[in-house]
Image (tube, rainbow, N blue to C red):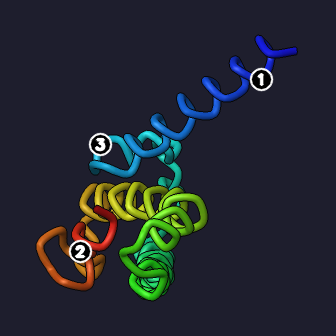
């Protein structure tokens, strides 16, 4: 019985560590998105998806800020918000790539405030 608890605890720690690593960079967040997910979208659909994605990213940033920097808030953020936030960042990267391949000019650029959300909130 004791061995089972120890293995379960160790497994939980490993999963938490892996998830924390997924939110640390764009390459890791793109791992959460299927390549070519938006290949069948036209420019209008890409723009709508990018706008929806940006709005949700801003909502999550506000929720993470509201949760606060204390340990309880950080725990809530890491469990409830950061996995979705990382996935949205990966999707936005895929949207930008697909838009560039199709010569669409309206998807937020990587350097613009609307296209690239602040990393300081996640850290």
**Is any part of residue 93 visible from this angle?**
yes
Q: Residue at x 66, y 29 (%)?
A: 9
How many neighbours does mark 1 have within 10 angstroms: few (below 14), some (14-19), or many (20 or more)? few
Q: In which quarter of the image is residue 74?
A: bottom left
User: Nearest the camera: 25 or 38?
Assistant: 25
The residue that label 2 is drawn on is 118
Residue 107 place in picture, x, y as percent: 30, 76
**Element marked by disc 1:** helix
Q: Is 2 situated above or below 67?
A: above
With 9 as the anchor, is 104 left or right in this view?
left
Q: Marks 1 and 2: CB-CB under 8 Å?
A: no
The residue that label 1 is drawn on is 5
With 122 as the anchor, is 55 left or right in this view?
right
With 112 as the anchor, is 8 left or right in this view?
right
Of circles 1 and 3, which is in front? 1
How many neighbours does mark 3 have within 10 angstroms: few (below 14), some (14-19), or many (20 or more)? few
Q: Marks 1 and 3: CB-CB under 8 Å?
A: no
State the residue lying farthest toward the front: 2
First reached walking from the N terminus: tag 1 or tag 2: 1
First reached walking from the N terminus: tag 2 or tag 3: 3
User: Nearest the camera: 35 or 84?
Assistant: 84
Residue 116 place in picture, x, y as percent: 24, 73
Q: In which quarter of the image is residue 123?
A: bottom left
Task: Please tell me the numbered disc located at residue 27.
Answer: 3
Q: Distance between the residues labelled 1 and 2?
A: 38 Å
């Amino acid at each position: 019985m004791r061995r089972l608890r120890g293995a379960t605890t160790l497994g939980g720690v490993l999963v938490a560590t892996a998830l924390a690593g997924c939110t640390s960079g764009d390459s890791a967040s793109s791992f959460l998105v299927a390549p070519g997910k938006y290949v069948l979208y036209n420019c209008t659909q890409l723009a709508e998806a990018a706008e929806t994605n940006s709005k949700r990213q801003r909502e999550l940033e506000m929720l993470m800020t509201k949760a606060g920097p204390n340990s309880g808030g950080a725990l809530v953020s890491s469990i409830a918000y950061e996995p979705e936030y990382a996935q949205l960042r990966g999707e936005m990267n895929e949207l930008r790539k697909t838009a560039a391949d199709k010569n669409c000019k309206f998807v937020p650029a990587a350097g613009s405030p609307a296209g690239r959300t602040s990393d300081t909130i996640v850290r």
